[in-house]
Amino acid sequence: MKVGIIGTGYVGLPTGVGLAELGNDVVCIDREASKIEALRAGKLTIFEDGLEDLFKKNVSAGRLTFTTSMKEGVENADLVIIAVGTPPHPVTKEADMKYIHAAATELAEYLQGYTVIATKSTVPVGTGDVVEGLIRKKNPSADFDVVSLPEFLREGFAVHDFFAPDRIVVGANTEKAANLIKTLYKPFEGKTKMLFVKRRSSETIKYASNAFLAIKIHYINEMANFCEKAGADVYEVAQGMGLDNRIGNRFLNPGPGYGGSCFPKDTNAMAYMGRMNGVNLSLIEAAIKGNDARKVEMAERVLEAVRHVPEARIAVWGLAFKNGTDDCRESPAMQIVAELLKHDVRLSVYDPKAIENARKLLGDKVEYADSALQAAKGADVLAILTEWPEFGKVDWLELKQAMRCASIVDLRNMLRPEEARANGFEYQCIGCR
């Protein structure tokens, strides 16, 4: 089928590549001309492991094209997917819907024949009704349905998750729309669970899922703090908890807090929706407050390691919010760096993929290194903030020779404490001693 995708970010582009790989004719639409020019020239505008080869394959096959024209992407489409951003409002933290509303209003003019409009962006409950109303107002004679098609792609693993989803959720209020989505996802029939629900339920599922996972992360971070004081090992505790199939072992890794483009935004939006509906979502509110405080706590741990060092130099390994992506949005690493910069310290930073995105945010406030070892040169302490696999492969002798003081604050528990200490390093980790 012909599919138009509005938005070429971390959701729209992997989705477009994936649907093209399944044999659909996909047109990706974006207002930002520079993005479209780069994509047409064969240059990816985001980093996702495994995306580049599929991107080039489907562009070459003619199944994947790019345009700034809404008309070109929407006319004669069977399905139009809205995958634009819903950033948090700077004051209320609710999801800002201006891009969704603009897309719905603009696409309405170009609908031809029966078309399903799918909101893949994470949107507040009731957005499908609003989108339907905007399209109907602009084009009263249009033949269309609006469905909720929430994305569950993990950044860094988006390609894997597209082709091996743990579930596909569809919020459709008509059988005709549901049948079209069934056709779209026929390649997954019998391979994954497909859940068809009411549109408002589907819109809620995405928020409820992300909020629950955020709470789980916050919980294990609090347990890590307890383990440090009580002399327990948080990994042994997490392993014992995870053996209970009611709990499961995922999202029980302690660290500097949750971040990225989804969890912070979605927990805040869910809390806002709770308040607007007169519901006290106390667990979500507590997780938000605790997660914000966590970044400050982690920065204080790094600063404590150089408390008595004048004009201390801090090496930072990792700026992306997690490994496998170049995304620095709401990155715990970036928030910790921001806290460190409030003090009289110098920072040298390195990330294998996210340097350019970090540079846009940090400017000349820090020094940028081309390698992990270069970042560590002359440092009084090394702070590991993102779990890139290369950071776990330390040449202890080279690292010790590069640093001025052999001190490591490992906020991702990438290194073995016994190895670090045996090689003469002062070493701090999370949730253990």
Image (cartoon, helix red, strand yellow):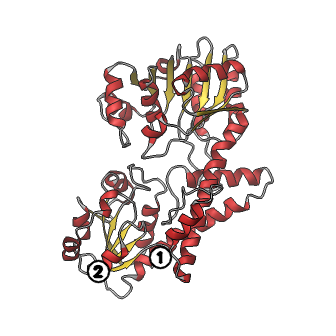
Q: Secondary structure at mark 1?
A: loop
Q: Secondary structure at mark 2?
A: helix
In the displayed image of the protein, which residue is found farthest to the bottom? 308
Real-space CA distance between mark 1 and mark 2, rounded to the nearest whole angstrom: 17 Å
Identify the mark at residue 422; answer none if there is no mark.
2
Q: Amino acid at mark 2?
A: Ala
Q: Is residue 367 visible?
A: yes
Expressed as whole percent of the image width and height from the top left, the position of residue 376 reads 25, 70
Above or below, 141 against 323 in this view is: above
Near mark 1 (Cα within 10 A), the count class, few <14, some 14-19 or many ≥20, is: many
Residue positioned 26% across, 66% down in the render: 394
Q: Is residue 425 visible?
A: no
Residue positioned 41% across, 25% down in the render: 21
Q: Nearer the viewer, residue 216 or 298?
A: 216
Q: Nearer the viewer, residue 17 or 109?
A: 17
Identify the mark at residue 432; answer none if there is no mark.
1
Identify the mark at residue 277; answer none if there is no mark.
none
